[in-house]
Amino acid sequence: MLESLADFIVGRLFGLDLESKLGDSIHFFIYDTLKIILLLSFMIFTVSYIRSYFPPERVKKILEKFGGFWAHFMASILGVLSPFCSCSTVPIFIGFVESGIPLGVTFTFLVTSPIVNEIAIGFLFISFGLRIAILYTVAGMVIGIVSGMIIEKLNLTHLVEEYVYQIHMNESETPNMDAKQRFSFALGAVRDIVKRVWIYIIIGIGIGAALHGWFPEDIIVKYTGPHNHFAVFASVLLGIPLYSNAVGTIPIIKVLIDKGAGIGTALSFMMSVVALSVPEMILLKQVIKPKLIAIFVAITGASIILVGYLFNFIL
C-alpha cells in the first residue's frame, strides 16, 4: 500500500518518471519516510511497554543479586531492555557504583544500553530484516560484556573520582503500573521519541535518497566494500568523534550497503557513533578520570572493530 502511495505521489502528483534518477530518489525518500515512521512507532511502542517493567531503580536491584560472568550477562540484557540517552550516563553510573555494583558490570550496562536500543533494533529490522537485527543485538551485548569484563579484570576502581563513593543516593521504590498505565507510558514514549527524532529521520533519508539516486556505486564499493581491509578500522575512527544516533545513521548506511558497502563496515560505524560519542565522554569525565575514559574507548573501539570484520566475513 505504501509503495502504491509513493508511486501515486511521484508519478501522478509530481508527474515524474519513476525510472529517472530524480523520480527514483524522490520515490525512495517518500516511501522510506512513511515506512520508517510507521514501523518505528510500532517498535518503540512495543519495546517501551516492555521497558516499563525495568526502571533504573529496578535494574539496579536486579544487578545487585548477581556476580561474576552472570552479572555482566544480566547487565547486558538489562541494557537492551532499558536503553538510556547520554544525559542519563552520570546518574546511572553514580547509582550503580555507589550501591556496590562492580565497575566492570556498570560499564557492561553503559556500553550495551546505547548500542542496542529500540530505535536501532527497529530501524535494523525495518531496513535489513530479522537476521541482521538479531546479529546486531547479540554483537552489542557481546561488546558490552567483553568490555566490562576486561575493565573489571584490570581493577581500575582507583580511576573513579573519590566523591562518587561518598554519595548516597536516595532509594525510591518504583510503583507498579497497571496495563492501562503501561499502555499510556508506551504511547507517550512513541510521541516523545518521534517528536524528537523526526527531523533526523528526514535528514537521514534525504541523504540516503541522494546517495541512492546519484552517488556512483563503484566509489562506495572501492572505499567501504568488504574487500577494503582498512574500511572497518577507518569507519570506527570516523564514528568515535561524531555525535549522532541510529536515526541519523541507519538510513544512510542502508543505502551504502545496498550499493555494495560491507555490512560490518556500516554497522561498526553506527556502533562507534552511538557507544562512544563525544558528549558521553564529556559527561563521564565528571565521574571517572581521563585514563579510564581512554581505556574504555580503546577496549570498546577494538571490540567494535573485531565485530565489524567478523560481520563482513560471515554476511
Image (cartoon, grey):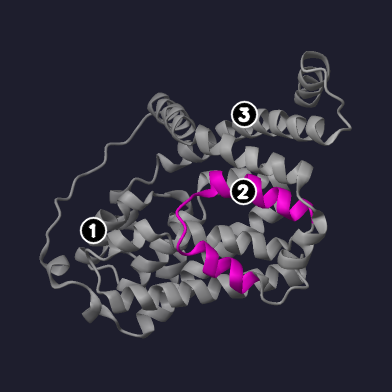
Q: In the image, residue 176 lies at what x, y percent?
A: 32, 36
Above/below status of 225 relative to 186: below
Q: Residue at position x 49%, y 75% from top?
A: 146
Above/below status of 228 relative to 273: below
Q: Are marks 1 and 3 in contact (CB under 8 Å)?
A: no
Residue 135 location, quadrant: bottom right
Membership of 243 in magenta stretch? yes
Secondary structure state at the residue bearing disc 1: helix
Quadrant for the C terminus, please: bottom right
Secondary structure state at the residue bearing disc 3: helix
Report the residue marked by disc 2. 250
Kind of residue at badge 2: Ile
Label 2: how many Cα within 10 Å (few below 14, some 14–19, many 20+): many
Looking at this view, is 193 or 129 the one in front? 193
Kind of residue at badge 3: Leu
Q: In the image, residue 49 lies at what x, y percent?
A: 47, 36
Kind of residue at badge 1: Gly
Label 1: how many Cα within 10 Å (few below 14, some 14–19, many 20+): many
Above/below status of 170 relative to 235: above
Badge nearest the viewer, 3 or 2: 2
Magenta-highlighted residues: 232-259
Q: In the image, residue 151 lies at what x, y percent?
A: 38, 78
Q: In the image, residue 312 lies at what x, y percent?
A: 73, 68
Report the residue marked by disc 1. 95
Report the residue marked by disc 3. 38
